[in-house]
Amino acid sequence: MTTALQRPPLVRSSDRMIAGVCAGLADHLGWPVKYVRLGMVLASFAGGAGVAFYAWLWTMVPTADESARRNARRPASPIAPAVSLPAPVVREAPRGPLPLGPLPDGGAPPFAVPAPAVAAWFRTRRIQYGKEILLGAGLLLVAAILIARQFGVDVPLGTLIPAAAILGGAAIAWMQLDETRRAGLVDKTKADQAGGWVRLAAGLALVVAGVLVMVSGSGSWEQTWLALLASVAVLGGVALVLLPWGLKFWKDLETERAGRVRETERAEIAAHLHDSVLQTLALIQRRAGSEQDVVRLARAQERELRIWLYRDAAKDAGLLADRIKAAAAEVEDTHGHAVDVVTVGDAAMTERHEALVQAAREAMLNAARHGGGTVSVYLESSDAGSEIFIKDRGPGFDPDAVPEDRLGVRESIIGRMKRHGGTAVIASSPDGTEVRLGLKAADTAEARIGEEKP
Amino acid sequence: MNGTPEGTPERTVRVVIVDDHAIFRSGLKADLDARIDVVGEAGTVDQAIAVIAEARPEVVLLDVHLPGGLGGGGREVISGSATLLGSTSFLALSVSDAAEDVVAVIRAGARGYVTKTISGAEISDAVMRVADGDAVFSPRLAGFVLDAFGTAPADIADDELDRLSARELEVMRLIARGYSYKEVAKELFISIKTVETHVSAVLRKLQLSSRHELTKWAAERRLL
């Protein structure tokens, strides 16, 4: 048991032949998949034990996705230790095929678990293991009955089978309820719902069939049909009566949920305003003497609020326009200079675009440091490439007269753009300076070839 | 905002300020220079329509978002004052970054759009320009226009209203880059009057074009 804990958790692998059971098992045990599959097939010939074991694992072992979802809620996978041992035991004690659907296995897995371990689970994970333990107990019972029959004891199968069917059906239906609740009634995907309905229907069918057989007692077909008809009629009548009430209940539930969502949204907005706007207003009041501080605070708050209000949730974050805006915001914060960004179009970030952003940032820093007034930044992106213009209204300078040791312009802007196949032009006049950065799309030719392939 | 004062200092322009924040109205009034004569103020759509009809200003400084009326904000004020459009020009003022707000008032008939964060002197210049019948584009509005019309110049086959000419694109790009009209004129070796002509032509296209992208794009932005 102790070694089992260090193994990778037992999950159904996505690399699957049927349901990913063998691959998952092999992963978990550290055995080659081939042998596990071969063993499973061989065991299948031993009275169908392999098939039963496979089916059992299929139902009980979560897929990797499900497991991840579960682990998000509790740290360790409980299934792994529970089923880490049965495989060899199945081979030791293959059993004959069993007559009943819901109880397919020969009762092997429960035998496999040493008693202390069971006790340990009960102490630590009483609730989570309820299902497994119940199933095991049921299988044990079936096995005992079968053995008893072989020894000649008369067991009233006519009563036991319908009763088992009812119990199984109810269990299946309740499992559904349990899982729905676990999913929080909210984040159900459609696939889950479909599976849920199938399970519910199967459970219902089992229960109804079991009740019918039990009530009619004899098991004669004519009587069963009649009873079936009558029970369907009764069920239909009950549904008809309860439907409006159920619908109303459902609608109330929906309304209440919508109301709660609105309330949550309002609370979120209030929290956001409190954390941002109110704090900034308080700061502004305290620093009312310093004009620059007030302007900087107001600008930063305005920017933050704009992003929050007009943010396009559908748009991918981290595209070129966003990065340029972020760089502008950074410059604005550090230098207290307004930086206005206008963007047309957008482009996905690549390594070359990263260089473009860095060069633009450097140009903005220069503009904020040496230029006066508002810094204007304009980004235009299209399929052909991206261009960025950074303009200030400072006194200007002579780009050729920049000393060699001033790395800002020469290295960070011009050099960087050249290294990445872009262009950088600096136009300066007494009215202001404009840095023009251009980056042609490099992969247009390749992309076109790629498109022609299919 | 996009240039030096055009009108002579003696000339004054009669202006009505429409904004629902009294603090902003009084602040703006204090900021505007001597060329501007504020003859009225309004805080709601209905008030604005009444004040404009009574005061008959040359220029209305109009906030895009306004309470009252049917909820149409600045757009509703312009359509409510449609009979005066010949003598009264509207200049949209906004804090909103949402393109559909701005484009809606421009398409309703406003002659320009400036952000509320610009200085009083710049707003005064913009008012003078609008009073002279020219259009006022902020860099951001130029960006919106380029976004809506696309950055490729018009083909001859295209409907004239649905595309910007190569020259108009150049002017729009320069304005988006933060150039004043004067700087645009210098850069393109044309006169300021020619720049104004191009900008007015773009404004007309923005107002009249039934360009699919313009409506679709505005509708998309509404989903923000």
Image (tube, coloured by chain):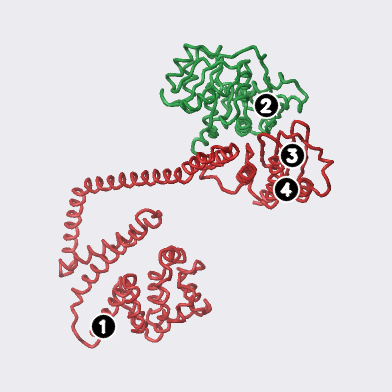
Q: Is residue A191 above or below residue A295?
A: below
What is the chain identity of the residue bearing mark 4?
Answer: A
Q: Name the front one of labels 1 and 3.
A: 3
Locate residue B174, reporting x and y percent: 70, 31
Q: Which residue is mark 1?
A: A144
Q: How far, Cα to Cα, is label 1 from label 3? A: 87 Å
Q: Amino acid at mark 4?
A: Ala
Q: Amino acid at mark 2?
A: Ala
Q: Secondary structure at mark 1?
A: helix
Q: How far, Cα to Cα, is label 2 from label 1? A: 88 Å
Looking at the picture, tell me which residue is in the foreground, B43 or B77: B43
Whether labels 2 and 4 share one chain: no
Q: How far, Cα to Cα, is label 3 from label 4? A: 22 Å
Q: Secondary structure at mark 3?
A: strand
> As drawn, is A220 to the left or to the right of A103?
left
Q: Amino acid at mark 1?
A: Ala
Looking at the rendered structure, which numbered label has been put on residue A435? 3
